[in-house]
Amino acid sequence: MRSSRPAITDATSFTTTLLTAGGPDNGWNPSPTDRVQIAYGADSRVQSLLALADTTGSESFAQLAGLQAAWFFGANHAGARMYDPMTGVTFDGLQPDGSVNRNSGAESTIHGLLTAIALDAHPAVAARATALTAVQARVGLEYIEAEDAVRTDGAVFTPESSWTGESSWSGNGLTLQPRQSARWDLGTSDTRRWIEPVVLTTPGERTQSVWRGGGLLSVTGPQQGVSPTPGALLPYGLTAPVSGTDVRVTALRGELTLDGLIVRPWISRLVLGGDAYGELVHSSAIAPQRTSVGADGVRASVTVYEADGSLVRATSTDGEVSVVIPAGGFAVAEG
């Protein structure tokens, strides 16, 4: 089990984040800059989850694999079947606007068939995946561009190139000098949210800023490694969650250069439908959180898991049920 810990952490934190944020995006570099979804991304998630299920014996990873594999059968933001079991065709890509690239090259076909072979070896997972064909609701990680501040006295700029040599700008950037500030609208939320500013720094550069409700952020640029560029775009988590509808920052020291804000809810949720019901609720909170799982009129089994995928509680319900999600844990409802 010890050798599986990195894979378990990846499955219970990153895969659950991907599922609730919109699916297997092509590139988070480090923000979700490339939101095209291709079969190899979905297949890699399915394969790793099934391998974990086989290795650990935990049903949690098989359940997550079923939710992820449903991407091929219509449970995606286009509501489109990406894999045709009658012909073996897998379409080449799902665009951020919901359109589908209906070419079918060798790479996509191969990865679609690899998922199909893996599902054939796990018939219970296959039955779940093929019955979940639509996204009914989704609340998860979002991204706000720095230049979309509703108020700022800083300077918006356009990078010479979107590629830094090791990461990607998501659009324009915003620079704040000491005593300059900015405010962004987060919208409403039923839960607190973590804010992770994506900051550009150069080696040894020190910046300090204060975020209303989020605490003090001190950043020192990391030393250059093998990258051809000395600057690094990296997300930095604030020390406290934000509970309001906006977030504000004031630069205190150094030049604060922002690409955007990663906004991560304490409780994220994905609800899939079709001939079956599937729901994933994931917590990024630092303490147990009570929330509801399930839907009115839907008979479902609900399982709650710790952050390592170990079982906490299993129950059945004919509607919504209140559960406590451990810190970093998740729950799955199947009906």
Image (cartoon, rainbow, N blue to C red):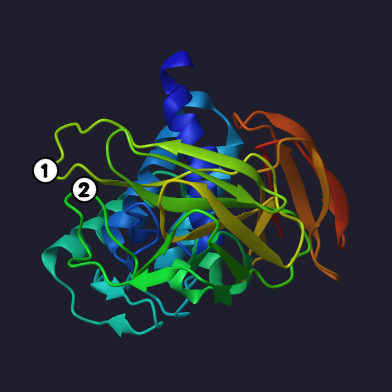
Give yes or no for contact between labels 2 and 1 (Cβ–Cβ under 8 Å).
Answer: yes
Indicate the quadrant containing the C terminus: top left, top right, bottom left or bottom right.
bottom right
Residue 273 horizontal side relative to residue 199, left or right: right
Quote the CA–CA distance across marks 2 and 1.
8 Å
Eyeballing the image, is 59 above or below 17?
above
Q: Residues within 10 Å of mark 2 (few under 14, many from 20)?
A: some
Type of amino acid under label 1 = Pro
According to the picture, the residue beneath numbered tag 1 turns out to be: 228
According to the picture, the residue beneath numbered tag 2 turns out to be: 166
Q: Is residue 127 visible?
A: no
Q: Who comes first in sequence, dot 2 or dot 1?
A: 2
The image quarter in which residue 271 lies: bottom right
- Label 2 vs label 1, nearer the camera: 1
As drawn, the residue found furthest toward the front would be: 179
Q: Residue at x 59, y 37 (%)?
A: 59
Residue 175 horizontal side relative to residue 242, left or right: left
Q: Residues within 10 Å of mark 1 (few under 14, many from 20)?
A: few
The percent position of residue 75, horizontal first and vertical second, equals 50, 70
- Dot 1 lies on which element? loop
Eyeballing the image, is 30 above or below 156?
above
Eyeballing the image, is 249 above or below 220?
below
